[in-house]
Image (cartoon, grey):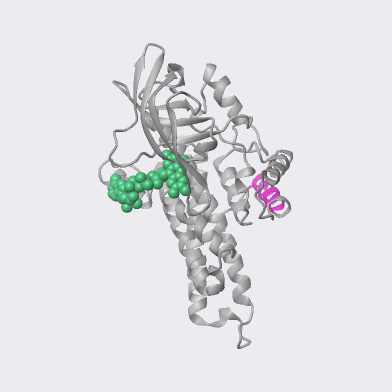
Amino acid sequence: MPESLSPELIALRDTCADFAATHLATTDSSAETRAGIRAAAKAAGLFTLTQPGEGAGTTSQLGLCVARETLAAANPSNMDSVFSPSAGVLGGVTGTLAETHLQPLLAGEKRASFGFTEPDNVTPTQGVIKDDQLIVNGQKSYVTGGADADFINCLVHVEGRGPSMVVIDTDLVGVELERKFVSLDGSHHAAFKFNNVTVPRHHIIGEPGQGLPKAMRQIGDTRLLFAAQASGYMMWVLELLKEYLSATDKSGEPRGNKDVVRWHYADLRIKAFAARSMLYRTARLADQGENIVNEAMACKVFATETVGEMVDTAIQLVGGIALVEDHPLAILYRKVRGWRLAEGASDVLRLNIGRGILELDKGRI
Ligand SMILES: Cc1cc2nc3c(=O)[nH]c(=O)nc-3n(C[C@H](O)[C@H](O)[C@H](O)COP(=O)(O)OP(=O)(O)OC[C@H]3O[C@@H](n4cnc5c(N)ncnc54)[C@H](O)[C@@H]3O)c2cc1C
């Protein structure tokens, strides 16, 4: 098995499996249900798992992957309510910004979103430092949860200094919520315009010009967790298929007796095994302090493409009933499609891996 887990991680996995069975079986996503899940996650020690130094005894990358994969393997509707928001690019900030933004974020009192993607053919979001202020102009086109966010961690090109991560409060004069939209999986996003928005200079995270590595680190960590989540959903699909293919069809034969069906099923299991092996190896490398930038990209590309193929094939094997709008496979089909674009399009990540090896002589894969 790719896992080979320590007793502590086996205990964490069991806690997550029990939690999913007890608290995540519902399809109701009302505010009341989500609040109940948050309270239960706090009691189970899962809520703060994403915050350094707290949680159910571990905050290792492997622990986070185990937790996320195990919860996803239950195909829950409300997985996002289990964990507190992570610090993201605000990790390690001190002083005023820690008090006004990081601490309220971790306490669940303020909501953050991430502004990186911009529309094609527009000038990148620019900032000009004037004394103690930064004047920001530009646009962000795909900000998940943006309409409900108190602030956006935005990539801004600061004149004379370069790309910087800047905390922009959404209630500032000149922040225009241009459009709200819903993507295929039902998640909510927003597009913003910044028209001469005046931001306190200390809202630049770290040194001006150091923003890109910070943003990429957050995206890198998230990529591995995407892979863990995809891997959990793979396990759910494989279990669903096992049950379905073990049952008999009209002829009285188990559905899985047909060679072609069995071939497809085995192929999916091989790919899931490969995706999980990559994930667990990469999480262990990360916990040893290794730079896993290439491995995380590889895990994200392979896991998100594999889960997409798996849901697609499962629909084919189960037949037309799986395309009825509220069938779990139809819901999952809509859920996983965006993952091949969010946090880096597969094509672009492939190019980055190729560039690392061919031009920069970096990376192990
Ligand atoms: C569910 C979801 C949530 C998201 N949440 C956020 C968020 O919170 N914050 C945020 O900032 N963004 C978010 N995004 C946006 C996401 O990061 C972008 O969709 C993704 O980076 C691709 O950018 P794009 O959509 O502009 O497409 P493009 O960059 O136009 O890419 C489209 C295609 O063009 C090709 N292509 C693009 N660039 C290159 C290149 N350099 N070389 C070769 N081929 C290339 C590839 O085939 C690629 O798939 C989210 C997206 C989704 C689907």
User: What is the span of residues highlighted in magenta in the rendered image?
Assistant: 6-20
Residue at x-position 67% and y-position 41%: 46
> Left or right of 360: which side holds 330?
right
Give the answer, above or below, for where 39 lies relative to 333. above
Residue at x-position 61% and y-position 73%: 244
Could you tell me residue 96's position as x and y percent? 53, 17
> Left or right of 123: which side holds 262?
right
Q: Nearer the viewer, residue 66 or 314?
A: 314
Q: Nearer the viewer, residue 225 or 321?
A: 321
Residue 292 seen from this side: no
The count of marks equals 0
Image quarter for residue 219? top left
Could you tell me residue 112's position as x and y percent? 53, 33
Residue at x-position 49% and y-position 64%: 310
Q: Is residue 252 magenta?
A: no
Instruction: Residue at the far bottom: name it.
Output: 251
Could you tell me residue 356's position as x and y percent? 31, 43
Q: Report the magenta stretch's main SS.
A: helix
Could you tell me residue 361's position as x and y percent? 29, 42
Give the answer, above or below, for where 34 lies relative to 148. below
Residue 43 seen from this side: yes
Instruction: Residue at the far top: name it.
Output: 131
Q: Is residue 13 magenta?
A: yes
The quadrant of the picture occupied by the N terminus is: bottom right
